[in-house]
Image (cartoon, helix red, strand yellow):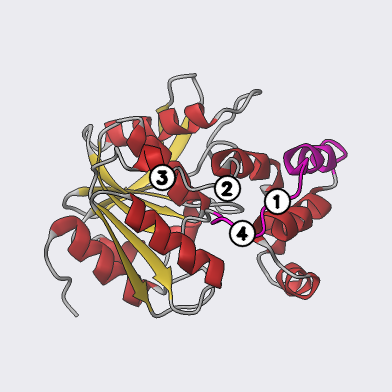
Amino acid sequence: MRKVVSRDGTTIAYQQAGDGPPLVLLGGGFRDHTIFNPIVPGLAPYLSTYVYDRRGRGESGDSPAYAVEREIEDLAAVIAEAGGEAAVFGGSSGAILALEAAMADIGITRLVLLEPPYRMPGQQRPPDGFAEHLQSLLDQEKRGAAAEYFLEGMVGFTPEEIATWRAGPMWPANEAVAHTLPYDTAVCGDGRLPVERLARLDVPTLVINSDSTSEWLRVAAEATAAALPNGRQVTLPGVWHKVPAEVLCPAVVEFVTGKRAEA
């Protein structure tokens, strides 16, 4: 992977593929750049894609003290590698990070957001003291317990869903990056949709949700698009919190380039 140095000196690892208008992709909790391996081949014929490991993950470095502003600077460093301006795709908590970065005016020309996990009024939020307890588990090296706690309190999984997740092939990778879960917790903040701040963001934005996702994520996608002056929401065929590459890629290509991807 190529490396770029963020403003605070942290090294950020990224990969570039394809040719065309630049698109930077960033994932959410538990994920490194490999989450986009199924997607890049469908985008690369039309876009110059940049996927990177968020700090603390994969081949990227980290810093002793975390702040969301440092992650925005990381994204800005990758955008600088892409020529100083780029469209950005963000999934899950990465979608919220992408919005925060766009409001910081770092050269984002378009946004594609997959199910930003905002919590609308009346919906369940993480319990009081969530961030502190999560960090306590990690301080005790209880990585598996921390991952389970995040899935319960932040994602809203039932015990049965957590058990299924833990039995899956991705669980070792989830535990390996459990130390970054406080980062995603900080990115999501109090979970509330920042309506007044988003009303001042005029970046063209496509908000996508799966037709088989949780109801609260669908509502969040609709509310996010409605809060943005240039926002548009679309529901695509998929599964929980995910749209398959063959469906997602044409929608992204058309929104970013204005041209339809060939079938």
Residue farthest along the left direction in this orientation: 259
Question: Label 1, on which residue?
Answer: 126
Residue 222 lies left or right of residue 152; in this view the side is left
Q: Position of residue 139 (x, y in %)?
A: 83, 35
Secondary element type, mark 1: loop
Q: Position of residue 111 (x, y in %)?
A: 30, 50
Nearest to N terminus: mark 1 or mark 3: 1
Residue 122: numbered disc: 4
Nearest to N terminus: mark 3 or mark 4: 4
Residue farthest along the front direction in this orientation: 122
Give the amino acid at mark 4. Gly
Whether 119 is drawn above or below 200: the answer is: below
Q: Position of residue 188 (x, y in %)?
A: 56, 44
| Circle 1 residues within 10 Å: few <14, some 14–19, many ≥20 | some
Marks 1 and 3 close (CB-CB < 8 Å): no
Give the amino acid at mark 3. Val
Front disc: 1 or 4: 4
| Circle 4 residues within 10 Å: few <14, some 14–19, many ≥20 | few
Secondary element type, mark 4: loop
Give the amino acid at mark 1. Pro
Residue span colored magenta: 119-141
Distance between the Cα atoms at labels 2 and 4? 12 Å
Nearest to N terminus: mark 2 or mark 4: 4
Question: Label 3, on which residue?
Answer: 195
Quarter occupied by the N terminus: top left
Give the amino acid at mark 2. Gly
Question: Label 2, on which residue?
Answer: 191
Secondary element type, mark 2: loop
Q: Position of residue 30 (x, y in %)?
A: 61, 53
Distance between the Cα atoms at labels 3 and 2? 12 Å
